[in-house]
Image (cartoon, rainbow, N blue to C red):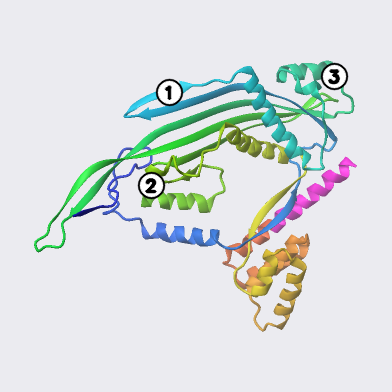
Amino acid sequence: MFWQRKGKPSIQKGSGTGDVNLGRKCLKPALIIGLLLILISGCAPKVRLTVTQPAEVDTTRIRKVAIGSFEVVSVNQVFKVERNGQWQIKNVGLNQEQQQALSNQIRARVVNLLSTTPYFQLVYTDEFRKLENDEALQKLIAAGGYRTSEIDAVINGRIWLDVTRIDSSEIDKVELEFVEGGRENSFNYTLQTLVYWPFKSISGTLALEMKLTRLNPNEIVSVSFDTRKASYKLGGKPASLKEQVAAGFQAAGSTLAGAQTDQKESSAIEESSLVLPNFNQLVADLSESIAAQFARRIAVTQMDVSYPLATGGNPTARLLIEAGAYEKAIEILNNTLNRAREKNPDDIYNLGLCYEATGDFGIALVTYNEATAIDPKNLIYAQGIGRIERLKREKRRVADQLVRRN
């Protein structure tokens, strides 16, 4: 006699409580086809390029910047442990020393990001860093009582943080089918039972306000308030078919920094080499994302992007493009297109991608338009046209901002 698991008869449907029998209800064919198309496009080869983006606000008169204090307004850290249906919840606060370490950690992330761009010259001084909060900074600037000279502006911020750790189990109702074999008139029967799937998780929400204040004249140039969330999990109930399809759509259709889940068998959680990130790692990931957004707002920055590479056409040229040998790929593609009786639009698009990578936006736009004229329904070609038109506008803005700084 042996037993086997007979599917998963019930799953949680959204935030409701209804059961959905996956053995009797199947996903709509259109949904499956749409998922396959998204996954195929997501698996297409990519080319990584570095583009220069203009500042969103006018900071051309600001060259030297000091980094002030990052005030910790609120920190909530909760530990939740469940055993046999009994929950123990413990709130753990941070003392003054730990809050200062948190402030310094986020401040260091901001300094590191701004130091990678030549747009600002950072001035390292403790005069503004030692101020207790934003109110003290604004009073000092308004009164002109600061001693550090040759500073055009100061960046400071405020922090709100919530972190939750959970050590518990998820419950799943399953059907076990028992089969007696090897004899004539053998029989089988099913038995419903509950399965417990232990898991551990950590999740956090960081809200960060960042402010750029000009010293002379005294004015607030830019203020931003952004939040980031992250969730990590080890163990737990294996994903159902419906949940796997939904996760596939989310992973293929967006680049959000969302939950990262490592599903393992319940007996392997403690022995697994995978570990949850600690408090400092979680804060670092969340703060760096917000600080990068603020840096793009106030400074000319460089950003790594990934653009799709057409899969047809000359294979040698594709390999050269993926390796970053754009000049050689241009030579090969031009020779290929000049000899061809019927031009392959994928070769034309890839040629435009090479021109885009080398900064020849005008030629790239002409090339993308030529590929689109041959195959007007190709989404990748149309994306290239829109991308070049945006890059041309941004290039003019970048040149204007850099000229006005000199």
Query: Which label belongs to residue 146?
Result: 3
Is 398 located above or below residue 64 in the figure?
Answer: below
Three-letter amino acid code of the residue under disc 2: Pro
Q: Secondary structure at mark 1?
A: strand
What residue is at 41 percent from the left and 57 percent from the top?
Answer: 31
On residue 89, which mark appears? Answer: 1
- Is residue 399 one of those drawn in magenta? yes
Most foreground residue, 7 or 340 = 7
- In the rendered image, the quadrant that contains the C terminus is top right
Q: Is residue 372 visible?
A: yes
Tag 3's secondary structure?
loop
Q: Residue at x 79, y 47 (%)?
A: 397
Numbered tag placed on residue 238 in the rendering: 2
Tell me which residue sits at (63%, 22%) in the image: 99
Amino acid type, residue under disc 3 in the picture: Tyr
Instruction: Locate residue 207 relative to residue 18 in the image: left or right.
Output: right
Q: Is residue 37 left or right of residue 74?
A: left
Where is 108 relative to 245, above or below? above
Disc 1 residue type (three-letter): Ile
Check the image and report above or below for 46 versus 234.
Answer: below
Disc 3 to disc 2, C-alpha distance: 59 Å
The residue segment tinted magenta is: 388-406
In front: label 3 or label 2: 2
Give the CA separation, mark 1 to mark 2.
26 Å
Q: Tag 2 or tag 3, which sits nearer the N-term?
A: 3
Query: Around disc 1, counting alpha carbons within 10 Å, would you say few (fewer than 14), some (14 to 19), or many (20 or more)?
Result: few
Asked whether 34 falls inside the magenta stretch, the response is no
Q: Which mark is residue 169?
A: none
Structural crowding at the residue carrying mark 2, measured as other residues with C-alpha within 10 Å and reported as few (<14), some (14–19) or many (≥20): some
Residue 224 versus residue 192: which sits nearer the camera? 192
